[in-house]
Amino acid sequence: MASLSIRKLDKEAYEQLRIQAATHGVSMEEEARQIIYQAVAAPKRITNVFQQYFGHTNGIDLDISDQRKPHEPTDFHE
């Protein structure tokens, strides 16, 4: 398994990481590991997100029966 050392981390970032780790009940190392995992994980494909919220479908049927015909042009010759 790989190892990583982070140098030059400012004091504010260090304290925020410490607080966040304590809030989640994990070590700072585990908190940093989870942050890195989330940052480099492949984003969800839009189809997966759609299926998560709307279920699996085989397409969408749109009712377009209420189409209007274009109006007759005005006759200015009279």
Image (tube, helix red, strand yellow):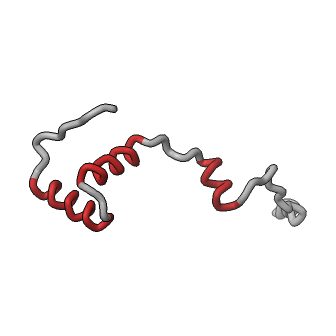
Residue 52 seen anywhere in this rendered image of the structure = yes
Q: Which of the 4 image quadrants contains residue 17?
A: bottom left
Q: Position of residue 54 (x, y in %)?
A: 69, 61
Question: Left of 61 or right of it: where is 44?
Answer: left
Question: Left of 75 or right of it: where is 53?
Answer: left
Residue 77 seen anywhere in this rendered image of the structure = no
Which sits in the foreground, 21 or 58? 21
Q: Position of residue 37 (x, y in %)?
A: 38, 45
Q: Residue at x 34, y 32 (%)?
A: 1
> Height in image: 51 above or below 23?
above
Which sits in the foreground, 44 or 17? 17
Which sits in the foreground, 57 or 21? 21
Q: Residue at x 30, y 64 (%)?
A: 25
Q: Residue at x 40, y 48 (%)?
A: 38
Q: Quadrant of the C terminus?
A: bottom right
> Height in image: 77 above or below 6?
below
Q: Residue at x 33, y 45 (%)?
A: 36
Q: Position of residue 6 (x, y in %)?
A: 17, 40
Q: How many marks?
A: 0
Q: Position of residue 73 (x, y in %)?
A: 84, 60
